[in-house]
Amino acid sequence: MRRVPLHRWLAVVPGLLILGGVPFANRVHRLVLGLPFLLLWIVGCVLLTSATMALIGSLDAKAARSAGASPDPPDRDAAR
């Protein structure tokens, strides 16, 4: 069984921020850029998730190149 590369654990960070941070962000009753702070927090977490997934994808490709494998292995079913 293969180990999961350490950089993939970065995917946990946005989930922890949205699950753990929302109860604390819900206590703030300010408008930031015209949005309630809680909505801004959730939108920020969604944008952070996109950036994190892009970073993980580039780190996966870099790790595959350094290992000598192609980053996207061909589909076995397509060859049939």
Image (spheres, helix red, strand yellow):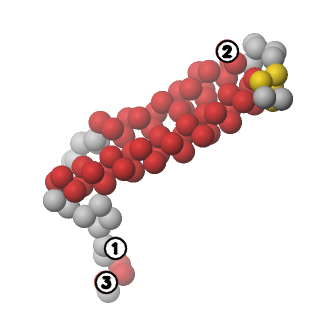
Q: Give me the residue at 67% from left, 23% from top.
A: 22
Q: Quadrant of residue 79?
A: bottom left
Tag 3 near tag 2, CB within 8 Å: no
Image location (x, y in percent) of residue 53: 47, 45
Q: Write down the residue under mark 3.
A: 79
Sequence-wise, which precedes: disc 1 or disc 2?
A: 2
Image location (x, y in percent) of residue 10: 41, 35
Element at label 2: helix
Amino acid type at circle 2 is Phe
Q: Write down the residue under mark 2.
A: 24
The Cα atoms of the two marked residues, 1 and 2, are separated by 45 Å
Q: Is residue 47 left or right of residue 54?
A: right
Element at label 1: loop
Q: Quadrant of residue 26?
A: top right
Q: Give me the residue at 62% from left, 39% from top.
A: 46
In the image, 4 versus 51, the foreground residue is 51
Q: Residues within 10 Å of mark 3 (few under 14, many from 20)?
A: few
Tag 3 near tag 1, CB within 8 Å: yes
Q: Which callout, 3 or 2, points to the residue nearer the camera?
A: 2
Sequence-wise, which precedes: disc 3 or disc 2?
A: 2
